[in-house]
Image: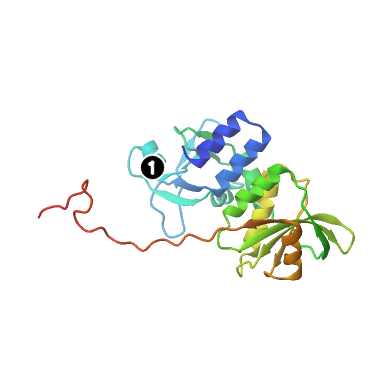
């Protein structure tokens, strides 16, 4: 079972929230797209299959599943689900996802276009200045969506603070502030917050995004009265250390 299998199973027995959670999992997954031939630079030729009601491309959430489906070596391109959706948007093609696997399904062109629009519509900039913050009051579904989405933003900021804010204009809303964001990561972090809002099924809720330095007055106030999400540190791969010959009893050294 892969994370996409689990999200698909939940969608099959759940409702709208589970359907949105599946699309969020698909967007964040690494996907292997079946190709006709090896890529030439940045140019790829996906393998299209006639599905009766139109052509579909074939993609899988693991290289092993792709090889099992083709029953042999095959050319592929690896990309994120969101990258694949952006590439296919407006092409009139469907997507056969994980065929012959537990999460097998065919996404029609309309579903891919909807997902591309959802992922591509970012948050709007605002100039409101908060003058007071208080304990947040957001639905649990959105808090869980935020927690899951922020976990994938490892290394982009040290933490995120959530509070209910009253602005100088008198307006009220919820504010999500990223602390010590890496330079150039602002768009990705704001997009992650925006996606959490959309895939929680609670688009009617408003969620403003800000970027603060640790120790700033607003960051201190939000720490006292709000919620804190610590973003994980990016994993540092261990340097490769070849095992000495004969150290694995299941792989004895070969004799010349």
- In front: 104, or 130? 130
- The answer to whether residue 118 is visible is no
- The percent position of residue 170, horizontal first and vertical second, equals 90, 59
- The percent position of residue 127, horizontal first and vertical second, equals 80, 65
Residue 243 in which image quadrant: bottom left
Work out which residue is located at the far front of the displayed protein and give it. 224
Question: Residue at left 16%, top 53%?
Answer: 253
From the viewer's perspective, is residue 217 above or below residue 42?
below
- In front: 72, or 157? 157
Question: Residue at left 65%, top 46%?
Answer: 145
- In front: 188, or 234? 234
- The percent position of residue 220, horizontal first and vertical second, equals 73, 66
- The answer to whether residue 51 is visible is yes
Question: Residue at left 89%, top 62%?
Answer: 169
Work out which residue is located at the far top of the displayed protein and give it. 13
Tag count: 1
From the viewer's perspective, is residue 152 above or below residue 70?
below
Left or right, 44 with respect to 209, comes to: left
Left or right, 247 with respect to 167, comes to: left
Q: Quadrant of the C terminus?
A: bottom left
Question: Residue at left 45%, top 34%?
Answer: 101
Residue 183 in which image quadrant: bottom right
- The percent position of residue 28, horizontal first and vertical second, equals 55, 49
Work out which residue is located at the far right of the displayed protein and give it. 170
Left or right, 138 with respect to 249, comes to: right
Left or right, 198 with respect to 127, comes to: left
Q: Which residue is mark 1?
A: 64
Q: Few, some or many C-alpha atoms within 10 Å of disc 1 (few <14, some 14-19, many ≥20)?
A: few
From the viewer's perspective, is residue 108 above or below residue 256?
above
Q: Secondary structure at mark 1?
A: helix
């Amino acid at each position: 079972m892969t994370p996409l299998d689990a999200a698909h199973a939940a969608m099959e027995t759940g409702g709208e929230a589970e359907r949105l959670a599946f699309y969020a999992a698909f967007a964040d997954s690494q996907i292997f797209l079946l190709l006709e031939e090896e890529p030439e630079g940045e140019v790829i030729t996906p393998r299209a299959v006639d599905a009766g009601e139109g052509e579909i491309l074939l993609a899988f959430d693991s290289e092993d599943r792709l090889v099992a489906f083709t029953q042999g070596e095959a050319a592929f391109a690896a990309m994120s689900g969101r990258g694949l959706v952006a590439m296919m948007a407006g092409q009139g093609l469907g997507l056969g996802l994980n065929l012959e696997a537990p999460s097998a399904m065919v996404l029609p062109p309309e579903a891919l276009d909807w997902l591309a629009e959802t992922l591509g519509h970012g948050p709007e900039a605002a100039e409101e200045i908060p003058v007071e913050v208080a304990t947040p009051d957001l639905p649990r579904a959105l808090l869980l969506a935020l927690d899951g989405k922020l976990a994938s933003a490892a290394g982009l900021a040290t933490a995120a603070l959530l509070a209910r804010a009253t602005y100088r204009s008198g307006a009220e809303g919820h504010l999500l502030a990223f602390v010590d964001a890496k330079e150039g990561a602002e768009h990705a972090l704001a997009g992650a917050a925006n996606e959490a809002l959309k895939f929680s099924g609670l688009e009617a809720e408003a969620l403003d995004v800000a970027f603060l330095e640790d120790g700033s007055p607003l960051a201190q106030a939000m720490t006292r009265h709000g919620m804190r999400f610590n973003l994980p540190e990016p994993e540092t791969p261990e340097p490769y250390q070849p095992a000495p010959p004969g150290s694995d009893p299941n792989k004895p050294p070969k004799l010349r």
